[in-house]
Image (cartoon, rainbow, N blue to C red):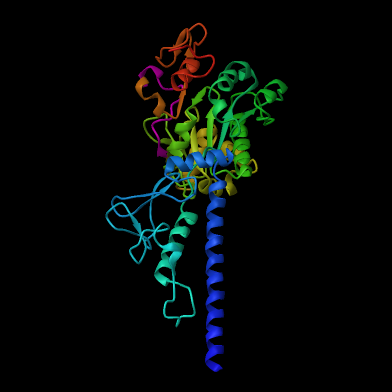
Amino acid sequence: MWSSERTMRLRLKNVVGGAVVVCGIVSVVMLVVGQLNSGGNGGRGEVLAAAAEAGFGASGYRSVRGGSGLDVGLAGGWERGPRSLAYDGSDNLITFDGRNTLEDTNLGLEEDVDGDKGGTHYSDERYRGLINTLVATATAKSPTALDDVFISVKTTKSFHKTRLDLILKTWFNLARHQAWFFTDTDDEEYQQKTGGHMVNTNCSSSHNRRALCCKMAREFDAFLESGKRWFCHFDDDNYVNVPQLVATLGNYDPHEDWYLGKPSIRAPLEIINRENISQRISFWFATGGAGFCISRSLALKMMPIASGGKFISLGEKIRLPDDVTMGYLIEHVLRKKLTVVEEFHSHLEPMRFVNTDTLAEQISLSYSQYGNEMNVLPIEGLDARFDPTRVLSLHCHLYPNFSFCPER
């Protein structure tokens, strides 16, 4: 009798333990599926497309490949696998007991042939291997997607019909939900054209220091409110290569402090320390005319000094425009260095020197006019009478299927 009761208790204990394990596995799988479904703004279709490109099948299982150590396929590239997983040298992901994960573990179930273990139970090694595989998928660093990026474009009323029309016809179509225009007036026409993405900053329409810092302050606060991972600022004379922007950001962790851009000067800027005029302050800044990006981690450190309009006061204190004030805040005050990314370009650069064979690799490009001379890309395409800035031709070079592009 006592033996029978003991056996029943052991069986009940194993059944309960097995149920807990199964619930744990189901919970982790649900976490994995939830994480996959949350990526990007394109819904399930975009997630599955990205998953397929990265080696995920429709089932949601991930593919693996060999290499130096273990490489686990993720939507954002190849990430080093956790130490709890091993690589057997033949392109196979293995668990502790040397069997292939998922396919060959049979979920780690073993049958109690002798009947002395209380029925079916989980092998510790196989179970740990399965859980490690699922947790590795659920907790790996998620990739950078377009919807992780807040793109702000600084503009003014006088450039709505000229510069904004070019943007709306070209690269804005690739980032309709991510790009916002910060201007200095209400404009119902362009509010409709942008799908409600025009922001009246109520700043001055002039190009002076305070007006520029005012718009930048509104851009920065809007990014903080958005909850996005990256803040990328551009001017209204920039062409933004959206896919390349997202691909570049994928090389950096938004949970770390990153200030990405390119200076327009050959040496750090030196200014007088207004708190001690006998000292000089030296720092780099990314020129706003080429665009720059800031990670959310860094932006959160900037909040006490720059949010809520305090950025304007900082610009007034050092008496410098918005992009220089940004560099002063990040490099001098916070002691975080600018990471130079050569693929940002401003109108201050001679566009004729840009290698047109590498246009798809560039992040931003620009144009300008000095008197009768146009500073534009030397690219073939549409007639210069209809496309003097070469922005339309650039877009057709990258995306030839747009309706206004000539047949090749």
Which residue is pictured at 56% across the width and 93% down the height?
Answer: 1
**339 relative position to 25: left or right:** left
Query: As rendered, which of 268 and 232 lies closer to the eye?
Result: 232
Q: Is residue 87 something that shows in the picture?
A: yes
Residue 96, image x, y percentages: 36, 66
Residue 364, image x, y percentages: 46, 27
Q: Is residue 273 something that shows in the picture?
A: no
Image quadrant occupied by the C terminus = top left
Residue placed furthest toward the bottom: 1
Which residue is pictured at 35% across the width and 67% down the height?
Answer: 97
Question: What stretch of residues is rendered in magenta?
Answer: 339-354
Residue 128, image x, y percentages: 43, 67
**359 relative position to 196: left or right:** left
Q: Is residue 274 above or below residue 116?
A: above
Q: Is residue 263 above or below residue 94?
A: above
Magenta stretch: dominant SS? loop
Number of numbered labels in the structure image: 0
Which residue is pictured at 47% across the width and 38% down the height?
Answer: 272
Query: As rendered, which of 326 and 241 lies closer to the eye?
Result: 241
Query: As rendered, which of 40 and 258 lies closer to the eye?
Result: 40
**66 relative position to 148: left or right:** left
Query: As rendered, which of 124 and 253 lies closer to the eye?
Result: 124
The reply to whether the magenta stretch includes residue 352 is yes
The reply to whether the magenta stretch includes residue 288 is no
Q: Is residue 103 above or below residue 40?
A: below
Q: Is residue 370 above or below residue 188?
A: above
